[in-house]
Image (cartoon, helix red, strand yellow):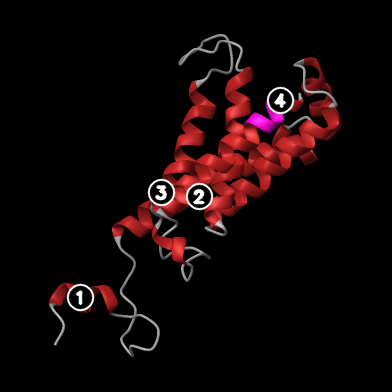
Amino acid sequence: MKPPTERARHSGGPGTGAAPAAPSATDAGILLLRLTVGVILAGHGAQKLFGWFGGPGLDATAKGFDQIGYDPGIFFAALAGISEFLGGLGLAVGFLTPLAAAASVGVMINAMSVAPAIALWSAAGPAFSYPMTLAVSALTIAAVGPRRLSLDARFPWRDGGWLPAGFALVAGVVGAVIVLALK
């Protein structure tokens, strides 16, 4: 007979015949974090791409990107919008979570690089703290994993770990550095 901790760890797995364990408070908490961060990011992407939620749309966003040195603005506006939109949706539903987190981290690093105040807090407008919080939240989701209440529930990165977190961080930073070098 297996020890109690071993039985609990393996209960509900494929082929065991045992019913899956009920979602834990951790599963629910990570779902709440994923939905919050993911919907915020996806909403910002939708503002850039489609003009939804009072956003400027792609053409106006492209002009703004041109003004801050991202040339051609249309390419970088579309890249930012797609990264936020798809990365946010991926985080929200827990699908390809390490990749969604990497996209989110990369675009938020770029947002931090152009925050006007480059201060943690700013009353004058966007500050470093907002994109930093979103990037750290996305990285945290990759590290902890999307858990059982996600589309990734059957994948090895469901419970996070160093490998999914490392992938999200390295891919996000490399992507951000490439974009910053090209602008």
- The mark nearer the N terminus, 3 or 2, is 2
- The mark nearer the N terminus, 2 or 4, is 2
What residue would you read off at disc 4?
181
What segment is highlighted magenta in the picture?
A: 177-181
Q: Residue 115: which numbered mark, if any?
A: none
Distance from disc 4 to disc 3, alpha carbons, whole Å, reads 28 Å
What residue would you read off at disc 1?
6
Q: Position of residue 42 (x, y in %)?
A: 63, 44
Distance from disc 1 to disc 4, alpha carbons, whole Å, reads 50 Å
Q: Position of residue 55 (x, y in %)?
A: 73, 32
Callout 4: SS: helix
- The mark nearer the N terminus, 1 or 4, is 1
Nearer mark to the viewer, of 4 and 3: 4
Residue 57: tell me if it is visible: no
Give the quarter of the figure containing the N terminus: bottom left
Callout 2: SS: helix
What residue would you read off at disc 2?
35
Q: Position of residue 88 (x, y in %)?
A: 60, 46
